[in-house]
Amino acid sequence: MFAALVAACAGGGGQPKPVALLASSARAATAFESIREAWEDPEHTTPLALRGMLEHFIAAFPVDGLVPRARIALSIVAMTQGDFATADLQLGLTERVPLGTTHDLWTIAYARRLRLNDAPEAALSMLRPLLGKNVDPMARLVFEEDLTLSALATQRDYEAISYMDAWLRASAEEEKDSTVKAVTAIVGKLPKEVLVGALQAMRAQRESFGYGVEIERILAGRLVEIATSSGDAKLARMLLDPDAGSIVAAGDAAVELGELATSRRGLNVVAGRTIGLLLPTDSPGLRDEAADVLRGVMWALGLPRGVRGRAATPRPSGADAAASRAPCAPQMPAPELDEPRPDLDVRLITRDDSGSPDRTEPSLDELAGAGAAVVVAALDGPTALRALRWSEAHGMPLIALVPPEDGEEAPVPRSFGFVLGEARANVLAALVRAAPSLATQPVVPVIDTSEAPRYPPQGGRFGPLTLDPPVSCEIPAVRAGEPRFPIAEWAHDKRSAWIVSGSADCAFDVALELSNSRARGLVALTLEAAGLPPHAPGLRVLSASAGIVPVNATGDTGDDEIRRFWTTLGRISWWTALGRDAATIARVAVEPLPVDDTSDARAVAERRTTARDRLATAKARLWTTEANGWGGARAMQRTVCAVDAPGK
């Protein structure tokens, strides 16, 4: 039937005069007026109810002059319901309706059928001649919408916006709310670039374009949603630019938009020799790790000024380098690194992403806008993956403190991203090499809250290990003076192997409580928990080791810098060492940069490339590895082994 309609429409002839089709009786006129009222109130009339009214009218008044109009309206409602067979039938029965308002309605209905049959270009060609014509109100409600949707379907987005403007202007007061809702829904599907271009054109040529206030308000409202939901600071600044005719926003959206517009996010600046640091300081699960990283970073940069100049505690009497723990591998030679001096003007800027994935990219954008030439980021695998991808997209040298999670796709190519930390799989392998029994019995994991997503909640395979359900490092004691950990339960279940991947303090508590209960077995510590806690003779404590980690309880390794740190800032954890190494290498990378600020796109790119190249070749004495730099790789190489903590 639809193919026949297409052929019929293609035929031509003369242009007869318009003919008015009228009701043949007062009763029919009254019945059709009820249909018209329902048609004009779509919010309170369902398509099913409207279809019933139309079918009843056609059956009750089969020869009335308004029946062709009712049939065309029925075809439109049927298309809304997806009933194209009925729509084609009704259009076929009315295809020869004489010129006039009823014929206009048929043209609009037929154009809708074309659009829904993937022929929007033909539909638009049929609708355009009706522009500016005094279309009957019943037809106009459909015409404005179909004209807009046909233009959008043919990729004429800006033309569609002008049609929506006309639609809003032509709506009667009682139709305004429903029209605004319909236009707002359509605008919500338009690309951001189209909305921005249209709004900028309206602002720049308001008088010549003659757009109405309502369409501009709807476009701006949608852009406010996009800016605040995506953290698009550049868009927020555009919307609030007073020189361009800033938009009016209200409530929470106005506050958020203002904060975005005044942030540094989205800007592209290099401010001298600036290092950016992204940490989840507001994240309860990573707060301690963030604090340790920050201590290491500030030490490497000599912040606050003078902190590194304090004298170290004298070495214990008779102590010498031989008394220190033997490293996993001999240290590679490295050039002497000057102490950080104020005249080098190396600056540190920080941002907090709260440990939330939604905050990673916006926070990195802020660091870029605040002038960072190199960024240090990522205390967990998912954040590392996002940060490394961001670094490639923005041409920003970035040091990820941990690798992306196992099984996650790494960015390729990784030309600006560097990974400093060590994969958990390598650490577990080193522990199992030193204690094969870990792989042959159930192991109890004791973990930080932030690590919970990485472990099977009910236990199971984890690399070479078979784990019990994890136990939290933050578990409180049931009663004062009693153990924090389920020592009695472990004894009942005959557990004799534990792996601690929380903090060194957590590892100390586990070893202490097991020792106090005279438990026997093996406690293995990952690099995050690395330490040499005292323990009872029946217990073996085995710590993963890399570089100088773990440092013994006196902080004495025969290295002057390490002893000065220990004297000034306390113990050195794996996180502290990572922060120190990242900032040490970053400092070497930014020292050759000019001290002035630049926002010139070419200069920014050149300085970041220079910092990237310097970062790749930098050499220094490092704490987390025996290597003295990246060695041409983008992931730090190190030997991981395991060392036994001495008993009491």
Image (spheres, grey):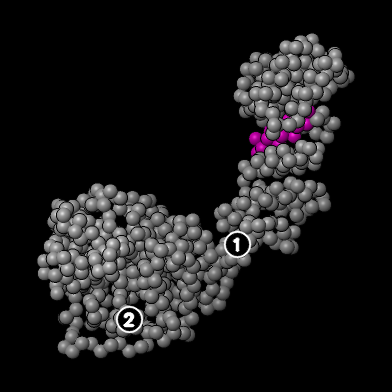
Q: Nearer the viewer, residue 361 or 62?
A: 62
Q: Secondary structure at mark 2?
A: helix
Residue range in magenta is 138-156
The quadrant in which residue 252 appears is bottom right
Q: Main secondary structure of the magenta part?
A: helix
Q: Can the viewer see residue 234?
A: no
| Residue at 66% over, 40% down | 186
Q: Amino acid at mark 2?
A: Phe
| Residue at 14% over, 70% down | 536
| Residue at 75% over, 19% down | 70
Residue 199 vs 1, above or below: the answer is below
Residue 550 vs 363, above or below: the answer is below
| Residue at 80% over, 40% down | 173
The quadrant in which residue 74 appears is top right
The quadrant in which residue 247 appears is bottom right
Separation of marks 2 and 1 at Cα, in angstroms: 39 Å
Residue 76 badge: none
Q: Which residue is mark 2?
A: 565
Residue 504 vs 230, above or below: the answer is below
The quadrant in which the N terminus is found is: top right
Image coords of residue 320 (percent x, y):
18, 84
Residue 260 badge: 1
